[in-house]
Image (cartoon, rainbow, N blue to C red):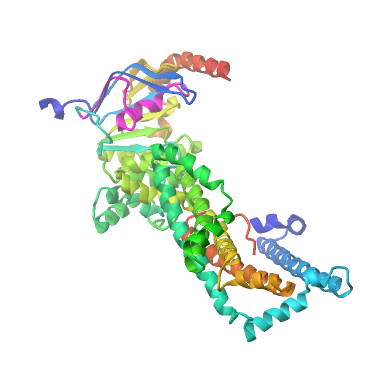
Amino acid sequence: MSEIMASPQAAKAVFAPGTSDREIEAAAARAALNYRRRVTFWRWAILVLFLAGWEAASTYGVIDEFFYARPSTIAMRLYDWITEGTSEGPLWYHLWVTMEEAMIGFAVGAVAGVLVGIALGRNRMAADIFSIYIKVINSIPRVVLAPIFIMILGLGLASKVALAFVMVFFVVFSNAFQGVREADRAMIANAQILGASQWQLTRSVIVPSAMSWIFASLHVSFGFAIVGAIVGEFVGSRFGIGLLINIAKGSFDSAGMYAAIVIIMVVALAAEYVMTMIENRLAKWRPAPLHETN
Amino acid sequence: MSDHATSPAIELINVSRRFLTPDGKSMTALRDFSMSVARGEFAAVVGPTGCGKSTTLNLVTGLARPSGGEVRVMGGPVSGIDPRIGFVFQTDALFPWRNVIDNVVAGPMFRGQSREAAYAKARQWLARVNLSGHESKYPHQLSGGMRKRVALAQTFINEPEILLMDEPFSALDVQTRSLMHEELLRLWSAQRASVVFVTHDLEEAIALADKVYVLTAGPATVKAVYQVDLPRPRVVADIRYDPAFIDLSRRIWNDLREEVQIGYQRSEQAA
């Protein structure tokens, strides 16, 4: 049905009297395929145009290559890093360090956010007492904590994890809290009358109904965890993608900076993809989304 | 204590219920409200929209407490949620993340029955509401009528002695609703729970119930009680053409109409 809707003109043409259902379905399937192809085409076309424009602009001096680099040198730098390693050692090691920091911070932050969010969501008094403090702490721009964490926890893993943690915690917390608050009252009353204890109620009604809120926040907050790790590395570290950026900055190596950004983009997109897959598996009870993006 | 076996299933004695509105004003939903439902009796409660019909049910479940008066269930005072009570909601109260059979086993599992026993029982109940073969579907894949049948199975599996229903079929279309009436009477006649069925649909109330309570516009109190002496088993789809049914519904409507108008005028003024 949605596919017929997706291309009204194409479908309208075959809805004339005398066309069979199969013809209509075939036309709709064709139209849908066409539509998807067009979308894919334009996605690639825009990327290619962008990169080609960038390349041409640097080549012909429209923009200063010194600051803006160009796609071909960035690609070469990436190739170099991948095959030869960076000046600071193998690329994979730096990437691993950054990912380790981000993933530990993300995991701990997400778990803590969910637990605290559910606990406060279930307890109104505690929520009213602590909400003011959460607001106060939440108003601190997280990156200013980086120097403090590095001072306290040192140049290693702990300070980056702490920064990733504070980036993730508040996002997940506020979504979990909201999700608990939005749990359907009739559903809660139903579970109670069916015989659920408070713990059963939390586990089998409150948490599942907050799950879609929580997942929405996990999507965003993995990106935040990476930001936390990189900013931490940026301020002070011995390894990591943030360090590579910092060194590239110090030597006015713009290609190196952009190459590091590309690496982070790829990692973040991959993480997003994995997260979507997990979510789809967990949320098979939900009605299918109205349109697929891919 | 000796009269426990013979006492009415549900008694509300001069109950009043006041609550605070969101802007801090005190509101009276029920005043001097008395009703009594015998064991195995099917009572319907009709009244204008927003008069406090649902409040009566919440008092019986123990989810709400009376501000005055007394609520007794099976001869004893209400303290907390009584396990002998089942409740069918107006809105969809199924758990959307559980499939049909996992929804139906919820009650027995919450109450600590073994997995095997709960699932076996759930299969029986799904067969009884004609949903065999749909066990692993999710609520969003079912029609409104099927979802309601799941809700009935979910409630009946606990074998409640008291069944409370809050406009359970009001969201269904007319044909589905009359099928659900048949279904409900069939299930009820096998179990003989005491029922309080809240509705704004007078015909529904008469077709199903032994006794109809007409409430006044809020604060609600009992305006009149009518016995419905139509023979059982009833065929809900045909009974509305029975002369006795028509006569009774005309008499009750005369009472109800005034209250509906009062309620309507109030809501106009408030708006």
The location of residue B42, given as percent across then percent down, is: 31, 29
> How many numbered circles does the render carry?
0
Query: On the rendered structure, is A218 left or right of A38?
Result: left
Tell which of A117 and B81 is nearer to you.
A117
In the rendered image, the residue lying farthest to the left is: B2
Give above or below for A128 relative to A4: above
Tell which of B55 and A149 is nearer to you.
A149
Residue displayed at 76% across by 59% down: A10
- Was residue B65 drawn as part of the magenta stretch in this picture? yes
The location of residue B137, given as percent across then percent down, is: 44, 56
- Magenta stretch bounds: B47-74
Query: On the rendered structure, is B245 left or right of A235?
Result: left
Instruction: Let me know if residue B240 appears in the view.
Output: no
Give above or below for A97 relative to B63: below
The quadrant the C terminus of chain A occupies is bottom right
Residue displayed at 86% across by 70% down: A57
- Was residue B188 drawn as part of the magenta stretch in this picture? no
In the rendered image, the residue lying farthest to the front is: A151
Residue displayed at 52% across by 65% down: A102
Tell which of A226 and B153 is nearer to you.
A226
Tell which of A81 and B117 is nearer to you.
A81
The quadrant the N terminus of chain A occupies is bottom right
Give above or below for B85 relative to B136: above
Q: Which image quadrant for residue B64?
A: top left
The location of residue B117, given as percent across then percent down, is: 24, 55
Instruction: Let me know if residue A272 appears in the view.
Output: yes
Q: Which image quadrant for residue B123?
A: bottom left
Residue displayed at 67% across by 69% down: A261
The location of residue B140, given as percent across then percent down, is: 49, 51
